[in-house]
Amino acid sequence: MRLNIDTHSGSSSIRIGFTDQRLTAHGGLIVWSHFLHKQKFRRQLDAVLPHAPTSPNAFAPADIALGYLGGILAGADKLSRVAWLQSDPAVAAVLGIEAVPSQSTLSRFFGAFTQRSCQALVALHTRALFALPTRRGGETLDLDSWALLHEDGHQEGVAVGFTRHGCKPCHRPLIAALAESKLVANYWLRPGNTACVTGAAEFLRQTVASLPAHVHIGLVRGDAGFGDAGVQEAAEALGLKFIFVARLTQKVQALCRHDDALGRRPRWPDWRCKRWRWSGRDDG
């Protein structure tokens, strides 16, 4: 059907049509879905997932996992928000799954995991590391830890720890990432009452030992939370160069303080005024 409309440049027309195709705002997921298809990721998931459904109406475990991952990429930060994508019928087609799982289905799915089955998933992550090229000069390994807050606080491993918002129930993840390749090399999920440096030395040794032989670490970086002698000794024993931010304790602050009698640079307002007065002088 065509409708005639008037524009500033003259008479024109617009075509209006109808289609049975489903539309979605998350169509960009098709690029990611196609990449996983080329990598035969579904087959790899089936090999490591511990689920063995017996009901003929049960979702395939790989479909549940892909639906969860697609929800995370779409911006969901809770299982209920992943399930909200059920209202978009085109998302399942874009992801190549039967349907987006519900919140209860996702809860049962994650409840079936044990420590052994979680370790089996590491094999998928290791394949990504082996696909990295050898970088001249090596990779930069960044260590970091932060507080992962939980409002309800009933998750396994949640403990009250210090955060920027005060003492809150949280997890304290420990993560190692390759800066140049932008890839996570290792990760631990720790209770919220764990200090940043707790287990960091062993974490560093495990990370370096698990890397492929062709991936070399040229530098290790960490903030003040990793400025501990144990972490530095572990880096030295592995023959790694490292940069750790020093803790700004009161003793360090006293060493950095300058005596006023030695003469300090004028404060900014005074310095600015002098520059303003000097700017009019022509003394070469």
Image (spheres, rainbow, N blue to C red):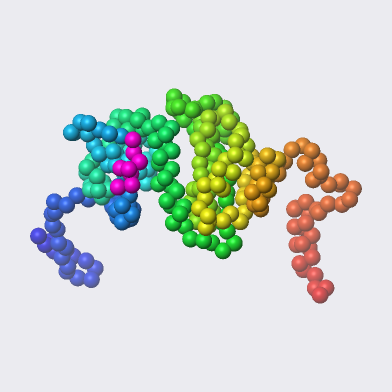
Which residue is situated farthest in the left direction here? 1
Residue at 62%, 46% in the rendered image: 222
Q: Is residue 280 above or below residue 138?
A: below
Q: Nearer the viewer, residue 65 or 211?
A: 211
Number of numbered tags placed on the structure image: 0
The secondary structure that most of the magenta stretch takes on is helix
Residue at 42%, 34% in the rendered image: 116
* x and y percentages locating residue 71 in the rendered image: 34, 42
Residue 269 falls left or right of residue 178: right
Q: What span is in magenta? A: 43-50
Dividing the picture into quarters, in which one does residue 121 lie? top left
* x and y percentages locating residue 258 in the rendered image: 83, 47
Which residue is situated farthest in the right direction here? 261
Residue 101 falls left or right of residue 13: right
* x and y percentages locating residue 104 in the rendered image: 30, 29
Q: Is residue 103 above or below residue 232?
A: above
Which residue is situated farthest in the front direction here? 213
Dividing the picture into quarters, in which one does residue 122 lie? top left
Residue at 44%, 56% in the rendered image: 131
Q: Nearer the viewer, residue 205 or 224?
A: 205
Residue at 64%, 49% in the rendered image: 238
* x and y percentages locating residue 188 in the rendered image: 51, 38
Residue 86 seen in render: no
Quadrant where the N terminus is found in the figure:
bottom left
Residue 8 falls left or right of residue 113: left
Which residue is situated farthest in the bottom direction here? 284
In the image, residue 103 lies in the stretch drawn in magenta = no
Q: Is residue 282 above or below residue 119?
A: below
Residue 19 seen in render: yes
Quadrant where the C terminus is found in the figure:
bottom right
